[in-house]
Amino acid sequence: MWCPGCGHGIVLNGLIRAVEQLGIDKNDIVMVSGIGCSSRISGYLDFHTLHTVHGRALAFATGIKMSRPDLNLLVPMGDGDALAIGGNHFIHAARRNIDMTAIIMNNRVYGMTGGQYSPLSAYGTLATTAPYTNIDHSFDIVQLAIAAGATFVARTTTYHVQQISEMLKEAITHKGFSVVEILSQCPTYYGRKNKEGGASEMMEIMKENTTPIGSKAKQENPNLIERGVFVKKETPEYCSQYDKIIERAMKGK
Ligand SMILES: Cc1ncc(C[n+]2csc(CCOP(=O)(O)OP(=O)(O)O)c2C)c(N)n1
Ligand code: SF4
């Protein structure tokens, strides 16, 4: 389903490795996705999968988790799916700290629909809907997730393949709302429009423009994008709190 060189395939690979290494039974995993090239990841996997509507994957996933808190919820999204149409669901899922893993494949564009700019397209970039440059400023997914209350927040790129699996393992086992942003390449639209070259050149750019959190390189060049785990904290998880409310209601006090 994906174009040759699309970064989303690398994310799929990293996710499969993470699940295998954790030894989770595929029947204990529910993957809920919306619409977008990234969201098609569910079509490649033999978990319980729901391919829902654009921007609403977290809302569907919330319903499933509330009724079956024993299952592992994975919610893969594109930057458009998660933060344009789905932005409202994203901040509220983070605020509630519901136990699920949001995997955001950030290619800074709407790939599926032909390369329109997204809320993650940086100021000054080109898109089919911004032929004279984009004048919108982009979100920082990590900062937004932290501010909204996510209790596990991490970022990596498709260049850093092993880090994808390691981060996803940590995110999946974390009890609470986990966000893993993975910078991914769309050579077909973003790469071509912004003259970044093919997939390998785009991955080289991700390598050059990112650095581990708090590195010396970051101090010398503040424009570098940090990779790593930004937040990992224990806060009461939504479903377990909800169970307590049910218990109180049953007792009538
Ligand atoms: C309600 C609704 N609005 C708009 C669309 C059209 N649409 C489909 S996918 C998409 C954006 C895809 O971009 P992103 O989520 O970043 O994923 P990518 O394809 O880049 O992986 C849009 C606008 C739709 N399917 N449904
Ligand atoms: S259009 Fe872009 S995001 Fe979609 S499959 Fe092709 S390379 Fe991937």
Image (tube, rainbow, N blue to C red):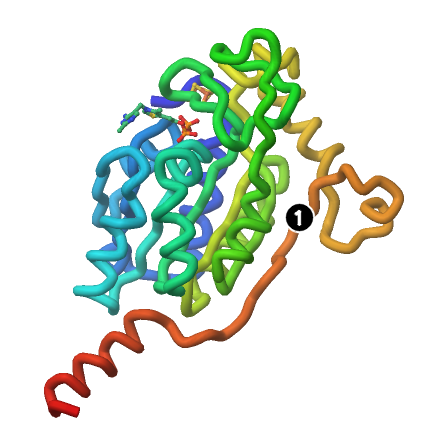
Q: Quadrant of residue 114?
A: top left
Which element type, helix, strand or loop, lies under badge 1?
A: strand
Q: Quarter of the picture for ligand 1?
A: top left
Q: Residue furthest top?
A: 131
Residue in the picture at 54% in, 41% down: 182
Residue in the picture at 45% in, 17% down: 116
Horizontally, residue 153 falls left or right of residue 194, namely left
Q: Nearer the viewer, residue 32 or 85?
A: 85
Measuring from the top left, give residue 145's x and y in whole percent: 51, 53
Measuring from the top left, give residue 246's x and y in whole percent: 17, 80
Q: Residue furthest right?
A: 220
User: How dense is the environment of label 1, judged by Cα within 10 Å: few (below 14), some, or many (20 and up)?
Assistant: many
Q: Quadrant of the N terminus?
A: top left
Q: Nearer the viewer, residue 135 or 211?
A: 135
Measuring from the top left, give residue 66's x and y in whole percent: 22, 64
Residue in the picture at 67% in, 32% down: 206
Q: Nearer the viewer, residue 5 or 112?
A: 112
The residue tagged 1 is: 227
Measuring from the top left, give residue 2's x and y in whole percent: 39, 22
Looking at the image, is 230 positioned above or below residue 44?
below
Residue in the picture at 22% in, 80% down: 245
Looking at the image, is 61 positioned above or below residue 116?
below
Horizontally, residue 34 falls left or right of residue 188, namely left
Task: Name which residue type carries label 1.
Answer: Arg
